[in-house]
Image (cartoon, rainbow, N blue to C red):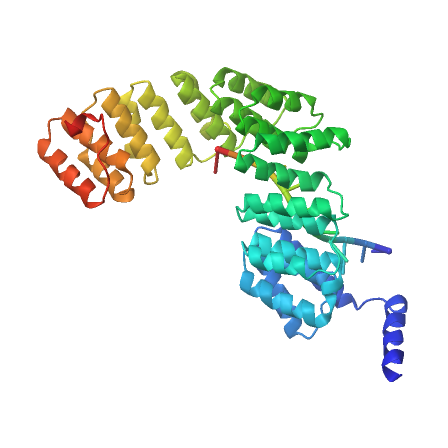
Amino acid sequence: MLFRVHLNLARLRKSWIPMPPEVFAWNTTIRKHAKSDYPFEAVKAFFTMRRMGIPADNYTYPFVLKGCGRCCRVGEGRQVHCLVVKSGFLLDHYVGNTLLSMYGDCGAIRFARMVFDEMPERDVVSWSSLIAACVTCNCFSEAILVFQQMMISEVKLNSVTIVSLLCASTHLGSLRMGESLHLYIIVNDIKLDIALGTALIEMYSRCGHLEKALQVFDSMSEKNLKTWTVMICGLSNHGRGEDALSLFIQMEKAGLKPDSILFTGLLCACSHLGLVKEGQEYFDRMVNAYNIDPKLEHYGCMVDLFGRAGMMKEAYEIVKSMPMEPNSIILRSFLSACKIHGWDHVDDHFKEILLEIEPTLGANYVLAANMSAMSCQWDDMAKLRVAMKGRGLKKVPGCSWVK
DNA sequence: ATAGGGTTAG
C-alpha cells in the first residue's frame, strides 16, 4: 500500500515538478562531449556527475553510451550497462538501442547481440542497430542473417536499414543482394537520400556495374563529398580514369572541396592512365591549393605513377624523401618498376626492408631474386633461396631465378 | 519552453 502511494507520488512529481536543473546541465555537457572529437570526456563527465550524487535520467544514458561507443571503451560501457539495468532504464527504447549500438561500435558484437536478444520489444532502430553492429564488426553474412530474421518479424525496414545492408552486400560482393535491395527501394518508393544513394553507387561500382552506378549518381538531386568520391573512385578503379578526372572537374565547379581520400582516387586514376603530368599537378594542387598533408597512400600513388612511366629517378626520390617509412606495397611497386625498366641503381636496402616487413609473401623473394639476377649478385640469390625454403615457401614455376 | 537511438568512402 505504502509502496503504491510512493509510486504515485513519483509519477505526480514527474508531471508537476520540473526536473532539477543540474541534471539538464550535465546532460547537455555529456551530449556535447559525446559528439566532439574527445568523446572520452563524456564518459569522464558522467562519472563525475555520479560522484557528485546527481542521479542520471533517461536522457543521460544515451549520451554517455554514445560517448563510450565513439571512444571504444567497452569497459566503461559495461559499467554504464550495469547502472542502466539497476536504474530500470533498460526498458526505454532509446537507452536500449544506444546500448546495443555502443557494443557494436566497440566491436563487441556478442554483447550487442545479447542486448538485442534480451529486449522485450524491438523496433526498426533495434534491428538496424544490430545490422549496423554486424557490419562494423565485419560480420557481413551475419548482417544478412539478421535481416532475414527481421523480415520474419513484423518490423518493416527503412532507408537506414538498407544503407547497412547495401554495405554488407558490397563487402560480400553480392550483386544479387544489392540489386534486390535496389528493387525494394523502387517498389516501396523509398526516398533516395544522400546516404542511400551513395551506398547504392558504392555497391554497383564495387560489383563492376559502373553504368548502373552512374545512373543512380545522375538521378540524385542532392550529393555530398562522399557521393562524388565514391563515384570518382569507382570510375578510377575500373580503368575509366578520363571519366573520373572529368567528374572531378565537375565537382570543383559545383563548389565542393576535395579531401585526402578523393585525391587518392584521382592519383590512382592518373597512375593507371599513365598521366604523369596530370598526376603531378593534382599532387601539387592537393598540397598547395587545398593544404592537405600527403599521406602514405598519396606517396604510394606517386611512386606507382613514376614507376609505371619508367621515370625511376623521380620514383626513387619519392621513396627516399617521403616523411614516413614506405610500406610493403610501395616498396614492391617501386622494386617491380625497377625490374621492369632495368633500373639497377637501387639500394639493396629496399629489398632487405621489404623482406623484413613482409617475410611470408613468396612474391617478395621472387622479386628480390630477380633483382639480384639483374645485377648479377648470385650469392644473394642463393641466400634468398635458402631464406625462402626456411619459411616453407615454394618456388614459383616459370620464375627466372629457379633455372 | 529547451535534449535522446540506427546509415555512406581509400
- Residue A82 lies, with reference to residue A232, above or below; the image says below
Residue A224 seen in the current view: no
Q: Quadrant of residue A217?
A: top right
- Residue A215 lies, with reference to residue A189, above or below; the image says above
x%, y% of residue A318?
32, 30
With A321 as the anchor, is A199 left or right in this view? Answer: right
From this viewpoint, which residue is outermost toward the left? A379
Q: Nearer the viewer, residue A377 or A118?
A: A118
From this viewpoint, which residue is outermost toward the front? A152
Q: Nearer the viewer, residue A123 or A266?
A: A123
x%, y% of residue A299?
38, 31
Q: Quadrant of residue A73?
A: bottom right
x%, y% of residue A115?
65, 60
Quadrant, the N terminus of chain A: bottom right
With B9 as the anchor, is A197 left or right in this view? Answer: right
- Residue A311 lies, with reference to residue A397, above or below; the image says above
Q: Quadrant of residue A401?
A: top left
Quadrant, the C terminus of chain A: top left
x%, y% of residue A143?
60, 45
Residue A122 seen in the current view: yes
* Residue under the point 79% across and 69% down: A20
Number of numbered markers: 0
* Residue under the point 67% across and 56% down: A98
With A202 as the anchor, is A305 left or right in this view? Answer: left
